[in-house]
Every structure is written in structure tokens, then in C-alpha cells.
Amino acid sequence: MPQLRLALAQIDVTVGDMAGNAAAVVARAREAAAAGAHLVVFPEMTITGYPPEDLVFRESFRAASRATLEKLASDLAAAGLAQTAVVVGYLDEDGGPRTASTLYLDERAGPRNAAAFCLGGRVVATYYKHHLPNYGVFDEARYFVRGDRFTVVRYRGVDVALTICEDLWQDDGPFAVAGQVGVGLVVNINGSPYERHKDDVRLRLLQRRAREAQATVAYLNMVGAQDELVFDGDSMVVSADGALLARAPQYIEGVFYVDLDLPTTDPVIPEHSSMRVETHDTQTAAVPSFRKQPAGIAEPMSDEAEIWGALVTGTRDYVRKNGFHSVVLGMSGGIDSAVAATIAADAIGGENVYGVSMPSSYSSEHSKSDAADLAERIGANYRVVPVARMIDEFVETLKLTGLAEENVQARVRGTTLMSLSNAEGHLVLATGNKSELAVGYSTIYGDAVGGFAPIKDVPKSLVWQLARWRNADAEARGERAPIPPNSISKPPSAELRPGQLDTDSLPDYGLLDEVLARYVDRDESVAEIVAAGYPPDLVGRIARMVDAAEWKRRQYPPGPKIGLKAFGRDRRLPISSRWRE
Amino acid sequence: MPQLRLALAQIDVTVGDMAGNAAAVVARAREAAAAGAHLVVFPEMTITGYPPEDLVFRESFRAASRATLEKLASDLAAAGLAQTAVVVGYLDEDGGPRTASTLYLDERAGPRNAAAFCLGGRVVATYYKHHLPNYGVFDEARYFVRGDRFTVVRYRGVDVALTICEDLWQDDGPFAVAGQVGVGLVVNINGSPYERHKDDVRLRLLQRRAREAQATVAYLNMVGAQDELVFDGDSMVVSADGALLARAPQYIEGVFYVDLDLPTTDPVIPEHSSMRVETHDTQTAAVPSFRKQPAGIAEPMSDEAEIWGALVTGTRDYVRKNGFHSVVLGMSGGIDSAVAATIAADAIGGENVYGVSMPSSYSSEHSKSDAADLAERIGANYRVVPVARMIDEFVETLKLTGLAEENVQARVRGTTLMSLSNAEGHLVLATGNKSELAVGYSTIYGDAVGGFAPIKDVPKSLVWQLARWRNADAEARGERAPIPPNSISKPPSAELRPGQLDTDSLPDYGLLDEVLARYVDRDESVAEIVAAGYPPDLVGRIARMVDAAEWKRRQYPPGPKIGLKAFGRDRRLPISSRWRE
């Protein structure tokens, strides 16, 4: 039985940085070849980064992707890797240029989400993604034309089939064809965004598809983040009988190896098949038999560790990929800013985090001491900027009372943070959580200002849970807990009027988050939620608050998606709507 | 030859207001029947409003649409309209409930963008949209499953085929099938958003499809606006030989009539056809011959009048459909705020417009006098709120200089407007134009604050052109020109530092807008634009400014789309991107 050492190159690429991404491929392929790998697999759209969104409509972008691929194939050979096979994702097109306004679902020519098999200085074979996801955060029917070719490459005695991401998630695609044709290995390259509990789903799905294809399946996912999406890695190899042979860790960039015994198959071209079968023979001899090394199988992370990893990765890559080196945020002494600041410190180092306490006349003493405590614990820079005089000028000039007076406090703080950003070059972080954002319990242009919002998709109950976990985890490692215990235990307050508590305006967060998970994440109706046992008045009130806050959410900065449905591309609701459940 | 009086019910519906929309159908159908109409046609998704976006994923919403349709059919009969045929758009589904996460492009069951033919108290036939647009502002592959049934209803001796919107724009759909089958009339119901110069394209397309179908085609479009989309009406009827028989005005809600001689056809079910042909016979006798009345053919509007109509309609419906009665905006004396205020006054009346002059120490004398002049001309409320002291507090407390000092002025003004909105309940209008938004020449959380941005999609050159047109048009009608001539003629300045002019930071607006039309609207590369004769340095600089401002645009309020590609749903670019042309 032929053997192969497969390298899973779980790397972080940057949208639009084609030269940089190609250089990373060469460097990682060289590292893999030095470790004896015969086949090195890179993520979906390695060359362009993923998702490139409407950049796909620029002819110059598509041309650059193709040119970069050709150059990469020859650079790999020039780097002494002519005998090592490399699979990369890229943007291809056929049928000539087209633009957004002419691209239509049904057309048979146009841009392609593609994979290339490179060997010996050239592109030996290409594959076009068959199943194009067009739900949730995905708009691939907008960008790509689906492929109908099933691509098999015979390499060192093994028939290797190429597939991309969504091909794994839908029936009747290349995995089914693989089962008809008979191949030794199916490679599946991914830009699969993190979502809670998705890792278990992926493994079960892989096992199912491996059985369907009657072949070993290598699933390779990118790591890193792009705007609201976090790619968690978690690359895996599963044998034809469903056994997990290798599993790379989540969020860690690197090359991971697995030695495989793979059958030589005798591909048959089926008479009836949903895809046209195309075979390529690289005319390469089988690898001389070698002693297999045991592959790593990463332990699954806890739910909290996995979420924290997503938030840190999302924040780190947003800061880095947008050319920032530091962040500034308001430190109120509350749990949200404490968790956001700790994520930032874990992402880019506490020394690059700038905390600002902005006490007004309604600020409690503990809001200042807890903020200072936090900064000290995470090693952040810290300053106090009193804002009472700026607020007073507005209140007096405009004779503000009530809600207008509450909001102006938040807006003076927002303006203060933006001024510090302008003056010192930090990225401003917004510290709102998903529960607040859902019901509109935030001040637009106030606490909502910022370029990025680390806990935008984290419900308040989970904010507390993560804080406790992060502290316990630090203590278990013998480190100091980063989040002041007082910030965790005290009742939440916006401190915009004397003695104010969140519970004055909102239901208990535990209850609120349960209803929001149904109404927002699962699109349940008010009637369905009430039928599940929640008080009708409460559910109706929450639904109205969520609907009325749509306009504010549209102007909120991006933040890492961790849940089933994040506010952003994932959830597209009209602002003008009279629909009331 | 049978005759029919066709009523084009060009109405404005509201997303989610199913009871209200159905009531409007009954009222308009009654009006049409009283005028002797035999067939009354309403827009795409009449019942739900269009586009309902992710509301489609709520089972309760889909169920309500179906229930509202059934009730509407019976309400029409109860209103004495049992003998009048009514075509309405609605949201249907088949194959049981499904959610965003399971909806997939290829599935054969799911939500449908549907049309119903109602007669005699019941739904006689339904049609499911065949071509689903998934480009530009459209995401219909996300929401709907395409229909493959071609629906013909024999009504009073005429075979009437049903089609929906995009069916008109793509080849190989129901128009082609109509030509094979042989029908007397093709009804095409629309939610077709306004775009400059689209009306001429529509007419030519209709003429082409009428010839293809060998039948009279009735094109019915909605009027009104939904968030960023404006529906301009412009409903038309074209005969089989391409003659324009009737044309309704743009932007005007109403019922428009056309008397038609239509052949009785003898439909044949073709052996090979891209859609399954389904015929229904309503068993109704031909209408006794009547004397045809001449139909109205609305004169095409000038380019400026048409754009102005779109901006006024977009602003009016956003204000109204979101429950506001008044707007507030900063009046700087400049051209942008003058045009935005005039649009608002035309939309909701000058008495509901609240202008605020917010002079700082850098404000010129004419900025105040021109603002007061504007308010007086359009009959707006007007006040002066000096902001120098608030600005000074920030500048002194934070020791601001340079850009930070410029921005804080804009942010103090933004906070002032939001405070007045909180205190008095007005919707805040942002007054930025498309050129500024493109290159990021605006202050986020400053002049960019607001719930709606009337000239967001209007390039600066066009802002001036519209201002001149609006003034000349008023004068031609013997009315006072609304826009102070001085606001049109003076060189534009943000007045954030002494003697500042826009041209200090930006190229001449005429040149800038030409480059932006290529780079933004047409996705041309820098190399292509340079090849067209523009200076390389300038084009490169503009492209970099556009790319770097993406994060700010994401947080900008919605505004009416008038161009080929508006910032918003129409143009989806990554924030994190290293792509440089």
C-alpha cells in the first residue's frame, strides 16, 4: 500500500496580500519538505485570502490571483520543492471578465473558488468548488460560478481528489462522486469560520463523508481572522472507516503532519454522475516505504477556552491586518470593559492597551478603583480623564435632562476616546456585549464608538462566564487573575444617573439571554417563545426592543462572530419594518 | 378580439405591515373596479413589502403572508369585487419550514417569491419567481427557491401569464416559454429599485420581451422606498410588436388604466420547455365590447428631476415608515446641508425640518447668514447653538491639536444634534455626499451622525447640479429658489481650521468624481483608470483614500441609492485588506 507523509499547513493569510500569502506558502512548503512531507495542503483561497468579497469583481484582482498562482508554482520548484506536491486555494475565472451587474447565478462562466495541485514547477490540475454556500455570512452565489468537474490527480500511486469547504457540507457533490469513482484520498481545503460547537459537527460530518467517499479525508482549515470571521484551524484527517488519524490544534498557526497508508485505487469513470470526472496522472513513482511517525491528535478545548481563543484571534488579526499596534478603550470598572481589555491584552500585549477612566459626577468610587486594578493586573497603560466639565457645558448650553442627559455623558466619553485615537494612533475598541446590542441598551456615538468590538457577539451571561473562566485558568497556571473580582461580582450599571442599575431597564440577564437566543439566533416567533414557557409581556417587550434597535446595530463596529447568528452579515433585517410578532 | 380594462395599481407598501398592505389592495381594487377595470395588478411582494430580507427566515412571517393572502382573496369578494381579477405578490413556501442555516441554493423546496391570481373569493393560481437576482443589492438566492412552473390563467377569453421582476431581465425564462405556449398577456410585477438611466433600459427590455413572448406585456412597479432602495413606479404596458401603450408617472402612487384588445390564444404545451406549463381556466365569459379610452403615457422626467424624486421619496418614506414626523440637521451654510435640507423640506414640509447652525471660532460670517437664508427660503425652523465652549473644553482638557482638534469640532456638533434629537424626537439627517464618503473626507461620529443620509449616493458635482436645477425649476414655476445662491457659488470648506478649503486636501471635485465613478461604481483598476488618461499619482492616491475609508462607511447611516453602485448592500468590501492596485 503506498505511503504519503501529508502536511497540513494551517496558516493565517491576509485578504489582498497575494505576494505575502504566496511567500508564506513557499516558506511553509519548504518547512514541510524538510520534515519529509510529500504533499502539503493549504487553505481555501490561500492566495487571495478569504473571503475577498467584492474584490472578486475587479478584473485586476482576478488576474493577479492567476498570475500569483503561476509564479508560485514556479517559485516552489525554484526553492527546491519540485518533487513536493502542494495544494493551494486561489481565485480563478473562465469565460472572460464580468462584473457584479452582469454576474448571474445561472451563468456557466465566471469567477471560480478554485484549488490548484502544483508539482514540478507547474499547475498540474485545478478544481472549482461545486457547492457554493449562500446563507449566514456567506454570499458565494454572488461571486462564484459552481464547478461541475470532479478532479482526481494520481500522485505517487495515490488517487487524490480535490474538494473545497462547502463540498463537505452538502450531499450529492464530489464526496458522492468520489465513492463512485474510487480514490485513495480526498483533500478538502477550508475557510470555515468558527462557531460555537461547530468542531464536533465537523468531525461527525467528516466521518460521514469519508465513509461516503470510501477514502481517507484530509480537512484543512485556515487560522486567523478576517473582519468578523474567525478561522479556528482544527484541521483533521479521518480514515475511510471514520477513525480520527490526526487533529491540529485550534487557533495555532503551523504545519502538522500525518503519515498515511493509502490504497492504490483503480478509478472508474461512472456512466451517470453529477459531475464530469477528470483524471490527471503526475507519472510519479510511489514513495519508498518508510516508518510512520505517530500523528498528533489535539485535545478538544473547553467551550470557554475555545470562545476566548476566537475573541483573541479576532481582535489580534483585526488590529494587525489594519496596521494598528495599540488599542484604546474606556475602562469603567465594569465587567464588559474588563473582559474586552483582557482579550486585547491577550491579543497584542497589555503594554499596547491604553485604558481610560472617564469619571463623571455619577461615577462611583469603585468604578475608578476597579478600572485601575484591571489596568495594573493586565499591564495596561492607564489614565484618568475627568469628563464632568465637558458634560456640564452640553447640559447647560442645551438644557438637557433625562435620556438626553444620560446619552450626552456617553457621547462625551466617545468623543474623548476618538480624540485620543486621533492624537495617539490607537484603534478604539467598543466594549458592548451582544445582549446590550440586541436590545439597544447602548448609546450610539457614545459607548458604541470604535473600530472593533471584541465582545459584540458575546451575550452578557457568557461575558461573566468567560471572566470567571479566564481568572480560574490563570490561577490554575499560577498566574494572577486578570479581571478584578469586584468587576465580576458587582451589579451592572451604566452609571449615567445616580444609583442606576441595568435591571432598572432590562430583565435579568439570564432570562434576557435565553429569550434572545431564541428570537435572534434561531428566528423563533414571539408565539413560539411564549409557548416554550416565557412570560408573554416580557417576550413581547424584548422583541420590540430588538426590532427598534436595528438602526443602531447597523452603525456598530465589527466584532468576532462566535455564535449561531451574529449581528452583521449573518443577520440582515430591514430597518424600516412594521412587522411585530 | 376580447377586451380588458387593465388597472396598474402602482402603490407604496410597507415591509411587515401585512394587514395595512392588504387593506390598501382592497381599497385600490375597489377604486379600479369602480373605474371599470377587469384586472388589477399590484407590485411584487405586495403583502409582505419588499425586500423583507431575513424576515423570510421566520416561520411566523411566512405563515402570516399566506394567511393574509387567503383572507385578502375573501375580503376582495366581500367588498363586492368577486368578478374583478386581482394579481398580488406575496411570500409563499412549500416543503415545510426551513431556516437560514439549512436553506441551500439547490434545494427544491422552501420560501418562494410568489404571485397570486385572485378571483371570486379565492386564489385561482400562483406563480413562483423563476429568475432570482443575487447581485448588486439583491440576495434572493439567500431567501428563495426558484420556481419552475409557467402559470397561465384563462380569464375572460384571454390567456394571462404571470411573471415577477427579474424574470424580465434574464433570458430563457417565462417570456421565452410564453412565446412557445402562446398567450395574450404577460403580467410582470416588480419591486424594481430606481437607478439612474434605468427607465430607458426597462422600456427597451420590455419591448424585447414582448416580441419574444409574442404578447402584450404589463410591467407594474411599486413606488415608495424601503431603507436604501427607492421604487420609482414607471409602470408600462407594451404591445407584442413593441409599441408603448401606457406609461405611469414616476414616484406617484395611484391606479393607472389601459384598455387592451387582446387575442384569444390557443395555448399549446410544448414538448420541450425549461419550465413546466400549468394552465388554469377561470370559466369567465369575455367582456362585452366597450369603447376604449386613451391611456396616459407619462412624459419622461429630466435626469435631475428623476434623481430629485428618488431622493425626496427615499427620505420621505424612511422618515414616515420609521415613525418620525420631523428631522434635525446641521445647517453650515454649505451646499451639502442646503441640498439635504431642501430634499427634507420637499419630503415632509419645511415646517418639519429643524436646522441648527453651530458656529465655532473658525466659522465664517457667511456660514451663519447663508444657513439662516436657507431656513427662511424653505420655511424650516432654525436656531443657532454656539459650540465654541464645548469644543474649548475638549481641546484644553485633552490638549488637542491638528487633525484631533479638527475632528473634535465635528464631534461636538454631532453630539449636539443627537442631544436635540433625544430631547425633541427628530430624526437626525447626515448631510455628507458620495464623494466625501468615498474618500473618507468626513468625521465619523461627527458630521457622519444620523439616522438617514439623503445625499449619501450623490457625488459632489451632482450635488451642485441638482441645486442649480432645483432653483431653476422653482423659478420656472414662479416660486422662490430654495437654495441660497451663495451656498452654490462659494468654494467648499469644512471650516475646521482658519481659511481651510476642501481643495487643500482633495483634488478638484469634477476630476475626483470622474475617477470615483470608475473606481467605485465600475470596479476599474488603477491601471485601467490611468490608461484612460488620468494622472497615475492622483488615481493611486484616490484609490488608497477610498480603500482606507471602508471602516467609516460601514458605520454610516443608510441613504437612497441612485447610482450604479451605492455604498451599502450594493458594495461589499472587506475592511481588512492589503489589496493595493
Image: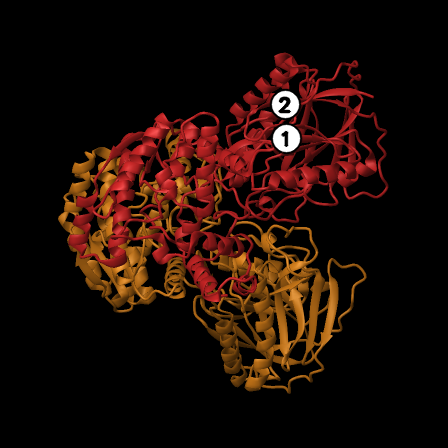
Chain colours: A orange, B red
Whether residue B430 is visible here, answered yes or no, is: no
- Above or below, B338 relative to A446: above
Q: Label 1 amino acid?
A: Ser
Image side of residue A176 versus residue A72, left or right: right
Q: Position of residue B413 (x, y in %)?
A: 27, 43
What residue is disc 2 on? Answer: B256
Q: CA distance from mark 1 to mark 2?
A: 9 Å
Residue count near mark 2 (Cα–Cα under 10 Å), binned few <14, some 14–19, many ≥20: many
In percent of width and height, residue A441 lies at 32, 41
Q: Amino acid at mark 2?
A: Phe
Chain identity of mark 1: B
Residue drawn at x 45%, y 67% as measured from the top left: A299
Residue B188 sits in quarter:
top right
Residue A169 lies in quadrant: bottom right
Q: Quadrant of residue B259?
A: top right
| Camera sees residue B163 | yes
Instruction: Pick whichever, B49 or A281, lies toward us.
Output: B49
Q: Is residue A559 above or below residue A575?
A: below
Quadrant occupied by the N terminus of chain A: bottom right
The answer to whether mark 1 and mark 2 are in CB contact below 8 A is yes
Q: Which residue is mark 1?
A: B235
